[in-house]
Image (cartoon, rainbow, N blue to C red):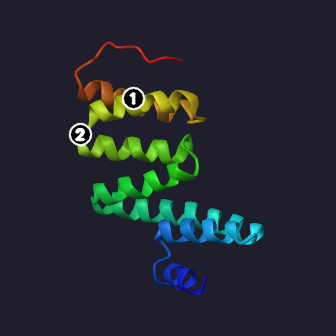
């Protein structure tokens, strides 16, 4: 546990260290601490992903946001941010495939449709209508 704690101290944006720490704490029966580590993992993945996205490090941003999805595969903020990464990278086809997950997630409608519109534009489907 001390090694996990140190890894988290060394890099507060290293979500995987928090996530792995959570798993070990849960296995040891430390449920309260495990839940705290899960919250910390989400914050770390998000913070790191945002920093990478802002700096244009799209691969690293994608990895961070995908880390959030290992906690909850339908986590709306992670899906939204992955859409931003795909837009920035011009990966519109992949973004369209991901949009199926957005349909079931609680992603705010304006953002979901804006990202979908960008993807459809990128693949030159100018008149396609989104599902409601």
In which quadrant of the rendered view does residue 5 lie? bottom right
Observer-nearest of 105 and 27: 27
> Residue, x 26% and y 38% (percent of image)?
91
Label 1: element kind:
helix
Q: Quick one: label 2, few (<14), some, or many (20+) residues within 10 Å?
A: some
Observer-nearest of 85 and 118: 85
Label 2: element kind:
loop
Q: Position of residue 84 (x, y in %)?
A: 37, 44
> Residue, x 52% and y 66% (percent of image)?
44
The quadrant of the picture occupied by the C terminus is top right
> Residue, x 47% and y 71% (percent of image)?
13
Q: Earlier in the sequence, mark 1 or mark 2?
A: 2
**Residue designated by label 2:** 90
Could you tell whether 96 is left or right of 71 in the image? left
The quadrant of the picture occupied by the N terminus is bottom right
Q: Quick one: label 1, few (<14), some, or many (20+) residues within 10 Å?
A: many
Could you tell whether 124 is left or right of 67 in the image? left
Observer-nearest of 10 and 107: 10
Could you tell whether 5 is left or right of 60 in the image? right
Q: Which residue lies furthest to the front in this view?
A: 27
Q: Position of residue 56 (x, y in %)?
A: 27, 58
In which quadrant of the rendered view does residue 57 lie? bottom left
- Please say if 102 is above or below 63: above
**Residue designated by label 1:** 116
- Please say if 62 is above or below 37: above
């Amino acid at each position: 546990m001390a090694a996990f704690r140190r890894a988290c101290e060394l890099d507060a944006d290293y979500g995987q260290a928090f996530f792995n720490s959570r798993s070990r704490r849960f296995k040891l029966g430390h449920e309260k601490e495990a839940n705290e580590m899960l919250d910390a993992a989400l914050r770390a993945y998000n913070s790191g992903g945002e920093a990478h996205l802002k700096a244009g490090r799209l691969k690293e941003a994608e990895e961070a946001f995908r880390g959030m999805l290992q906690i909850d595969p339908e986590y709306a903020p992670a899906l939204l941010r992955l859409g931003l990464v795909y837009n920035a990278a011009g990966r519109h086809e992949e973004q369209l495939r991901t949009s199926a997950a957005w349909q079931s997630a609680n992603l705010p409608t304006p953002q979901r449709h804006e990202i979908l519109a960008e993807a459809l534009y990128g693949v030159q489907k100018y008149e396609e209508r989104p599902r409601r």
